């Protein structure tokens, strides 16, 4: 197991290094910059570029940035008047997205997997048909349409829920539901499909022929093998939800890390672009790494290959 974990750890580190390098050079290749405005004096622009070291050769900038990154320094925002560091921005605003994302993730997993299991158990019944209809309907709706519909129904028409900011528990309802609705039904559909595939295998028929109860067959034998594709989907889903939905944060005026990721791109704030991209990439790679380890625990045959 140790060699299995070490091999995947090295792969994850190499992947993160490639993401950092590609982001750095592609960002520099994009036309424009944080100080390239019509109202800015060219001499002032050159002084600002020199202040942040962007007047130096590209390779020298890269080596300098990687050295600072190894020491944990992500630099300072170039457009923030207060001169806030990227580390401070992430530390201040990621907890907002994390709190919101954890609630949405909990909602999606706790409701999505049981719904899929129940649909598999009641295959070809009225419940199963209704489940397929509603799951297909909600999965096909984009998140921004769902959030706007929630705001119109519960915020504007019924006026029972706040439409902006996070001030009390009621204000969490629509953002959490808007973020969780797609992953919930996605997990439910995946759980149903994998359970139906597993229950048709020979070893499940053998377990039933031995007289085992349906509960034991479904939850002890079938669910363990059916959980592998579900865990695969949950890994990247965790990273996506925990970093916050950009659309949801924008619609509900929530000051999360997604808001600053979008603003950094529009303002060409190079340190903030790099910092948030590295943070998102590291979180995604970490989730996939944990999924790989869980694979080896759930199915020992995988780590022996």
Image (tube, rainbow, N blue to C red):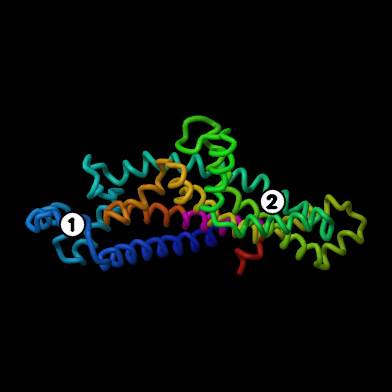
Q: Position of residue 261 (x, y in %)?
A: 37, 51
In the picture of the structure, the residue carrying the numbered disc 1 is 37
Determine whether, in the image, residue 25 is placed left or right of residue 45: right
Residue ID at (60%, 50%): 181
Residue 248 percent coordinates (x, y): 48, 47
Magenta stretch, residue numbers: 284-298
**Does residue 241 appear left or right of residue 130 in this picture?**
left
Query: Which residue occupies the foreground of this view, 88 or 134?
Result: 134
In the picture, the quarter occupied by the N terminus is bottom right
Residue at the spot x=32%, y=64% of the render?
21
**Camera-side residue: 196 or 287?**
196
Q: Is residue 95 left or right of residue 33?
A: right
Residue 20 percent coordinates (x, y)? 34, 61
Q: Residue at x 87, y 63 (%)?
A: 206
104 shown above or below 69 = above
Q: Residue furthest top?
A: 168
Residue that label 2 marks: 113
Give the distance between the C-alpha atoms of the residues marked 2 and 1, in whole angstroms.
51 Å
Residue 16 horizontal/vertical position (percent)? 40, 61
């Amino acid at each position: 197991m140790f060699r299995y974990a070490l091999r995947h750890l090295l792969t994850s580190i190499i992947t993160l290094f490639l993401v950092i390098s590609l982001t750095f050079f592609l960002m520099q290749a994009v036309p424009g910059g944080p100080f390239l405005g019509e109202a800015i004096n060219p001499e002032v622009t050159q002084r600002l570029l020199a202040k942040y070291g962007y007047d130096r050769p590209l390779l020298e900038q890269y080596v300098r940035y990687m050295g600072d990154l190894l020491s944990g320094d992500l630099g300072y925002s170039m457009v923030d008047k207060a001169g806030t560091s990227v580390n401070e921005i992430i530390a201040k605003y990621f907890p907002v997205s994390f709190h919101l994302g954890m609630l949405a993730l909990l909602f999606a997993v706790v409701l999505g997997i049981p719904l899929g299991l129940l649909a598999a158990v009641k295959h070809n019944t009225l419940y199963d048909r209704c489940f397929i209809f509603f799951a297909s309907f909600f999965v096909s709706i984009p998140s921004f349409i769902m959030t706007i519909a929630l705001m119109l129904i519960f915020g504007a028409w019924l006026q029972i829920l706040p439409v902006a900011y996070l001030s009390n528990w009621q204000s969490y309802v629509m953002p959490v539901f808007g973020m969780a609705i797609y992953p919930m039904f996605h997990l439910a559909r995946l759980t149903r499909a994998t359970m139906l595939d597993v229950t048709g295998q020979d070893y499940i028929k053998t377990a039933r022929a031995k007289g085992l109860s349906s509960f034991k067959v479904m939850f002890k034998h079938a669910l363990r093998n059916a959980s592998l594709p579900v865990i695969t989907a949950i890994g990247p889903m965790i990273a996506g939800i925990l970093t916050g939905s950009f659309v949801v944060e924008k619609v509900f005026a929530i000051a999360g890390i997604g808001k600053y990721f979008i603003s950094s791109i529009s303002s060409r704030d190079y340190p903030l672009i790099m910092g948030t991209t590295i943070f998102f990439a590291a979180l995604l790679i970490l989730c996939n790494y944990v999924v790989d380890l869980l694979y080896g625990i759930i199915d020992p045959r995988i780590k022996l290959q």
